[in-house]
Amino acid sequence: MVEVKSRIEKHIDVLSEYTATPGFGTTRLTYSQEDLKARDYIKLQMKELGLEVTEDGFGNIFGKLEGELEGPSVLVGSHFDSVPNGGSYDGPAGVVAGLEVAALFVKNKLKPKYPLEVVALVEEEGSRFGGGLLGSRGITGLLSEEDFFQLKDSNGISTVDAMKKIGLDPTLPKKRNPRTMKAFLELHIEQGPILEEKKIPIGIVESIVGLTHLEVTVKGQAGHAGTTPMDRRADALVVAAKIIAQLPELAKEEGNGTVTTTGRLNVFPNGANVIPDKVVFSVDIRSGKEEQVVSVVEKVKELVSSYQGDGIHISVEDLLYMKPKAMNQEIVSLLKGKSSKLDIPYCSINSGAGHDAMVLSDFTNVGMLFIPSKAGLSHCPEEWSDSKDIEKAVHIFYEVAKKLTEAQ
């Protein structure tokens, strides 16, 4: 038990060093030099366990423990990218859990009937190329190769160029046959306060919230800040601010836990004495019910259209849409049963955040565990979860993976 915990802490500590903002949280954008260092470390750990290591045309990493049969794999893992100035646990904790599940198979000399795969997925956060869940959407075919090749970051760098810069091959196969996936298990930090407040180490996820990401572009007319009269202006930032200020009320009116967030706003040309001629901002909409997500999307588009005219042109792009997803009930039952057998306290919980598990749930059987987040904090340098809780999740997943890799 101590050995597993110490390895978990080592993995988390090492991965946290691969950040573009030392001392100010984890900033590990997809296909960056920090990404390269993290993936090299993850692949090395896989190889030391004797796993067959491969990467696909998105840069997703797979470490396979061969089974007695050539059947579908049980996948265990998460993502390893981060938001800017984020924490060390969001994503990596799940990858580390996958490594430790595989380590237990190897240590106990357990050869599974069906293969076990540790997976480390790219661009779940969408911090560099927008939309999010890129790795899982890619392998399931929800993101086409053509659309993937057209993606660019805020500096105009394409996915292809970014991949090549760190030695990845964008021509490798991308979409994965769902028949090769028997199940997917993902550990994640809760990113909320419920488990800590209840003093319960494990949350068994029953469902994941529905979400959509919109990108709104407001175009106006640039001009001199001192010489353009107020009644002759088409100020893109003023219009964007008016729209953004009304978004929280749309969520409140919808109710039932519906939330909206604008977390990204870019102003052009971004000069102190220049009237902004373009503003691009994000709108993140989430709810446990699909009809409420759809309703708010429609209301946002109606609100946006009401500001068209007088030199202002506004467009809305749908970057991502995911329905609320229920986890596989057989795996949920397995997780509960194994937790009880191991005498690990748990409770059922719903996820207010999106995860790769929600994408994969349409293509294979999915189960997900949460562990407590200190003070409920996430996406910030203060993000922290106890390695003891990660260890508990590892042992639960190990028992469940044993069952899934042996079952028909």
Image: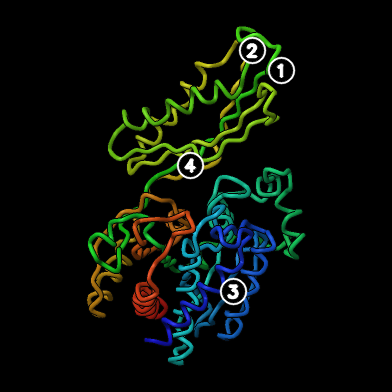
Q: CA distance from mark 1 to mark 4?
A: 37 Å
Mark 3 lies on residue: 42
Name which residue type carries label 2.
Answer: Arg
SS under mark 1: strand
Mark 4 lies on residue: 321
Locate the N terminus and report the quarter of the image it occupies.
Answer: bottom left
SS under mark 2: loop
Q: Position of residue 343 (x, y in %)?
A: 23, 78
**92 up-or-down from 150: above or below:** below
Q: Residues within 10 Å of mark 2 (few under 14, many from 20)?
A: many
Mark 1 lies on residue: 223
Mark 2 in CB contact with mark 1 (< 8 angstroms)? yes
Mark 2 in CB contact with mark 3 (< 8 angstroms)? no
Q: Is residue 25 left or right of residue 278?
A: left
Q: Earlier in the sequence, mark 2 or mark 4?
A: 2
Q: Residues within 10 Å of mark 4 (few under 14, many from 20)?
A: some
Name which residue type carries label 3.
Answer: Ile
Q: Which mark is residue 233?
A: 2
Q: Residue at x 73, y 43 (%)?
A: 156
**41 up-or-down from 297: above or below:** below
Q: Residue at x 59, y 45 (%)?
A: 130
Q: Residue at x 50, y 64 (%)?
A: 88
Q: CA distance from mark 2 to mark 4?
A: 35 Å
